[in-house]
Image (cartoon, rainbow, N blue to C red):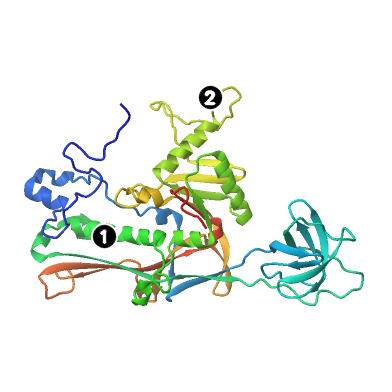
Amino acid sequence: MAFDLRTNNLSGIAIIDQPGGVAATQENFISTYDYATQYQPELVPQLHYANGLGRITEFLKFASKEDSYASDQVEHMELRRLHNILKNVAVVGATFTSPTAHNLRAGDVIKISDGVIEAQAEVASITSATVFVVTNDLGAGAFGFAGNVDVMADFSSRFQKGSDPFATGKNWNPTPKYNYTHIIKETYDISESNMAHKNWVMTPFGPRWFNAEMERTGTLFDNKAELTTILHNRVAAGSASAVAGKALGMKGVVQQIEEDGNVINDYITTVDNLSAIAFRAKQQGNCREFTVWADHKQMAYFRVLCAGVNASFVNGAHYGIFSNSKDMALKLDFSSILVDGVTFHFTPWRLLDDPTMLGSTKFLLTAPAFIILPTGMTDVYENGNAASKPYLSLRYRRDGNVDRKRQVKIFGLGGTPQKADKMTANFLSEMTNQLIGANCYFVGRRGAAYYTA
């Protein structure tokens, strides 16, 4: 019989999902603490979270640095590439027509290729922002190109002795990048009578109390902040939400990568796949070390990929050394690999596998399989000044005495008095993220053809 890990147990209940047909209400809610207190008091010291604590706040803890901001948006400036390549340029005789602005000057020397012939020419005159005329450096007649060409615009120049320089210089205008403030809220309330279930513990700072349900709400709130920072799409202009006047919110990490970075369909399964990513990294920037946050399936592909390099056949390549303890037959997982001068560190990401989040059946077909982040610091212009900053920062609204990183306001018992016979805890965070150099990031989706553009 084939391996068959069943979704349901013998009672017919889906082991990883909530039961169908039942609405979660305050009336049918019971916490693990209440259950132990009311029905099996001997279990109070042994409370067990059957599916774990549910906390997923690991990505931003390790992948970003914390910072503050005061206005409704954060802004930095990014300088794009130094050199200008013109692609798909039409050629008629000595006249070149570029689909984009060429930024050339008379006297610039350019290199030209149609994929077969490589030529060189000097710009003789500028007709318009997209059209220029050249003088052939290598021949007296037509270039003989078979079709449209690519032009290396910033190649060289040649001047006679005592001649005047260029009439105009070149400018590199920084591109502004923005992200926007985002307010997240959550609420927990309980009748004041049931607050007798709170526990007191002694700490070096004096007695403190806790409540299991309130703790769970706080964890849920933190998880939402993490999910928002990673996956939230800023509300699109003209959408029903925007027209209705709803808050627009931040751009999540994935949205920014998909807008300005690198996107990948399907999983990384071969060394050639990693080599292609390494080559793109070299084309895009100076970072040569990346962290790959991946789901279970991608981590398994990494294991097979790396172990396969140390194949057990004649003349097979050798990959590193397995580090084993005396009680371990073989350590199969790898954590890092150097491919073509670029280092990749692999780490599993539970968010992508959790069946109540991106590990759900339908999301398994569309959600990210991995995100690849550059490590280290990079240079950026912010507020008119050059600064060295991490590629990803998590920023909270702070100004003077105002600190909105994670506010918890309690009303009723133990807090500000209120009319209602209950205790209410309101959670609030105002935050955003600052992603620098999106062109150095990668996101891969599980769908084999998710990205079609």
Quadrant the N terminus occupies: top left
Q: Residues within 10 Å of mark 1 (few under 14, many from 20)?
A: many
The residue lying at 17 percent from left, 53 percent from top is 21
Q: What amino acid is labelled 2 in the image? A: Ser
Outermost residue on the top side: it is: 314
Q: CA distance from mark 1 to mark 2?
A: 50 Å
The percent position of residue 269, horizontal first and vertical second, equals 50, 40
Residue type at numbered disc 1: Gly
* Residue 377 image position (x, y, % from top left): 55, 58
Q: How many marks?
A: 2
- The residue that label 1 is drawn on is 218
Name the mark on residue 312: 2
Q: Is residue 59 left or right of residue 343?
A: left
Check the image and report above or below for 116 versus 130.
above
Tell which circle, 1 or 2, labels the residue nearer the N-terminal end: 1
Q: Position of residue 387 (x, y in %)?
A: 56, 67
Task: Check contact, mark 1 vs mark 2: CB within 8 A.
Answer: no
Q: Residue at x 19, y 43 (%)?
A: 13
Callout 1 secondary element? helix
Left or right: residue 315 versus residue 141 is: left
Q: Secondary structure at mark 2?
A: loop
Judge left or right: residue 452 versus residue 20.
Answer: right
Depth check: 313 or 52 in front?
A: 313
